[in-house]
Amino acid sequence: MKKSHVIEWDTKDFQQKVMDWYGKNARDLPWRMPRETKKAVKPNPYHVWLSEIMLQQTTVLAVKSYFEKFTHLWPTLADLAHADEDAVMREWAGLGYYARARNLIKCAREVFNHYDGAFPRTEKELLKLPGIGRYTAAAILSIAFHQESVVVDGNIERITSRLFMIGEPLPQSKKTIYQQASIIYDGIGCSASDMPQALMDIGATICTPKSPKCSLCPVCSYCQAFHFSEPEKYPHKASKLKKPSRVGEVYWIETENQQIVVEKRGGNRMLGNMAGLPGTNWDGYGQEKIPDLDWQRAGEITHVFTHFSLKLTIMKGKIRSSMLILNKNQYLVDINNLGDVGFPSLFRKVIHFVSTLKEVE
DNA sequence: GAGGCGTGGGT
DNA sequence: TACCCAAGCCT
């Protein structure tokens, strides 16, 4: 196809088509205003921020219950700023990327202490806050404060790559994507809050990574990939390398009172600040001391992280509580209360494995 | 700027 | 099964 056949672009018309679609098809999400009250009520910046942090690299389905739980436990930013750190980590357990939770607490406290509890309204100030990067700053400015911003998440990256048939692979194409995206948002005006959300809804439900539903797309007439190529081939990405494998041991240490040794993991590492079970080093962080017990090999579990897979051998040991010497970061939990600790999924898997053994016994 | 950082669902 | 993928940020 010759370059002269490139589609004629009309920003106003494009925006109108997207907003018309959104008016009929917007998803009903817990952090969104109900449609009837939308015009009358201002967005809650605390809710916008909280949902954006939770949604980073995470699916809408996974976030819903966490968002509702957090806003119930901590209805305002001030509540969260004063919350017990371990309680926040416990409630975040299972959602992953735990640095987000550590930064969530820091950010709430900074906004409370330095901005009188109200999020700043400039990109420069937002970017200084922990856990807020280029995307989230733009999202808060537009969604919470109705400022025209170039909001580019994974969805909009994909949509833009297809609209303009950007052949350069990610992540090198990011600069081009931002340039093109700024055209999409140009002069958006009173729809500054809705436009990025509309695009993300289209990305999540129509312009999907695989098998996009172009027949339902309100702007397929503008899509170069649709006319001249195959949309699912965009954006191009460099192929990924194979995941390395790691191994380790995890210790199930049980007392005669049916209590289990649990520890709080050190910050700024894998599963940092989260509860865990003792074990050997598998994340390249320090050395754990191996208790001198009569160990019994109970089995193994495999857990796949983003950048490596881990095979943990579960070692069971019994010890009399009078003989037990706990490290400063360790404590005992009744075996029946392990469900309330708030373990990351890796350790939930271990606990579940051991509990299936108990049933057999 | 490339790699570290979780988890569960889909194909 | 073994990938890929989801409203990224930080170093």
Image (spheres, coloured by chain):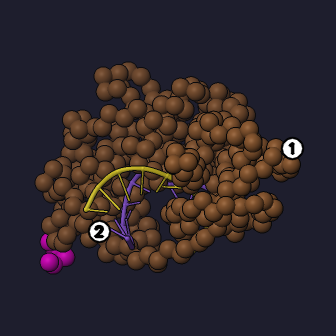
Chain colours: A brown, B yellow, C purple
Compared across the picture, whether A208 is left or right of A247 comes to left
Secondary structure mostly taken by the magenta-highlighted segment of the chain = helix
Q: Residue A70 in the image: x percent, y percent?
A: 55, 32
Q: Which residue is mark 1?
A: A322
Look at the picture and state if A325 lies above or below A164.
above
Q: Residue A234 in the image: x percent, y percent?
A: 29, 68
Quarter of the figure with the N terminus of chain A: bottom left
At x 58%, y 38%, the residue is: A339
Q: Output the chain of dot 2.
A: A
Q: Quadrant of residue A29?
A: top left
Compared across the picture, whether A163 is left or right of A297 comes to left
Q: Which residue is mark 2?
A: A234
Q: Secondary structure at mark 1?
A: helix
Please tell me which of labels 2 and 1 falls first in the chain: 2
Q: Residue furthest front?
A: A361
Q: Residue A51 in the image: x percent, y percent?
A: 48, 39
Q: Nearer the viewer, residue A228 or A242?
A: A242
Q: Which residues are magenta?
A: A1-5
Of badges 2 and 1, nearer the viewer stands 1
- The answer to whether residue A329 of the structure is visible from this angle is no
Look at the picture and state if A268 lies above or below A77.
below
